[in-house]
Image (spheres, rainbow, N blue to C red):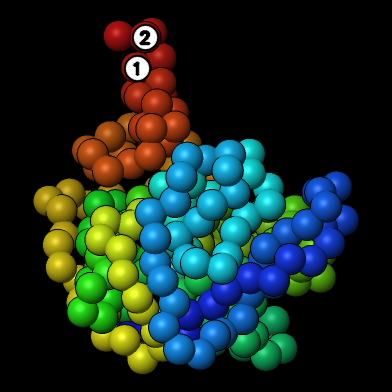
Amino acid sequence: MQLLSVNVGRPRPNPWKGLDATGIDKGPVTGPVAVVAPGPKGTGEVGLAGDRVHDVKHHGGPDQAVYAYGREDLDGWEAELGRPLANGVFGENLTTLGLDVNGALIGERWRIGPDVVLEVSCARIPCATFQGWLEREGWIRRFTRAAVPGAYLRVIEPGDIRASDPVEIAHRPDHDVTVALVFRAMTLEPALLPRLLVADALPGETRERARRRAHPDGA
């Protein structure tokens, strides 16, 4: 398991959400990139030095510090869409190889290279920027049905990473809540929400949504 590329964004106009800019246009960089613990959501900070988000209401902050997507899943989309998909095109910071990103457990920890430890926190939910960027009508619906969303991660131990760094699963929690399950529960299958509550590492907003589904009477 390894990193194929570390991808950093370049600001570009975002007509799809009526914002001045988006950071979804990410591409591979050479050399080491510093992984840092970002400030709170709303600041635009993320976990890679030189990168940021511009839709600060919905992106960034500690629970969405780093976004990872598997090269194998990009290859699957290449075949389905009939077009090449470069590393970083989904807006991912890390393009991985040999790692089951969507099967990762919430709270699972990855050691990348000698120093960095990241923790799986939640699934990526597609938005209008993503659809507009790929120039695919109906992309949000198509991506949602596929349920291969990629994973957001928290920064547990900062440091430097670079392409070709090995990825080791340093810890797997004792539950069955995967990134894919969270995505399904948060999108097309809300009846699954109560199953998420066993994952202590869920972001607070997701946990509260699951709790309300499990206890609609407020108990």
- Secondary element at tag 2: loop
Pointers 2 and 1 in contact (C-beta within 8 Å): yes
Q: Specify the quadrant that holds the C terminus.
A: top left
Which residue is nearer to you in this view: 184 or 159?
159
| Image quarter in which the N terminus is found | bottom left
Question: Is residue 76 positioned above or below 200 on the image?
Answer: below
Side of 27 where 108 appears, left or right = left
Residue 167: x %, y % from top left: 26, 79
Q: Looking at numbered disc 2 in the image, what kind of residue is underneath it?
A: Gly
Residue 42 visible within the image: yes
Q: How far apart are marks 2 and 1 (CA)?
A: 5 Å
Q: Could you tell me which residue is drawn at 38 percent across and 39 percent down?
A: 203
Q: Crowding near pointer 2: few (<14 within 10 Å), some, many (20+)?
A: few
Residue 161 position by quadrant: bottom left
Residue receiving disc 2: 218
Q: In which quarter of the image is residue 96?
A: bottom left
Residue 142 tag number: none
Q: Residue at x 63, y 44 (%)?
A: 56
Q: Can residue 148 be seen in this view?
A: no
Q: Which residue is drawn at 38% across and 54% down?
A: 37
Q: Tell me where residue 54 appears, x and y as whole percent.
A: 68, 52
Residue 30 on image: x %, y %: 51, 90
Question: Hey, what amino acid is under mark 1?
Answer: His
Front-most of 47 and 82? 47
Residue 130's place in the image compared with 166, above or below, is above
The quarter holding residue 23 reads bottom right
Q: List the residue tagged with mark 1.
A: 215
Describe the element under mark 1 as helix, strand or loop.
loop
Badge 1, how many Cα within 10 Å: few under 14, some, many 20+? few
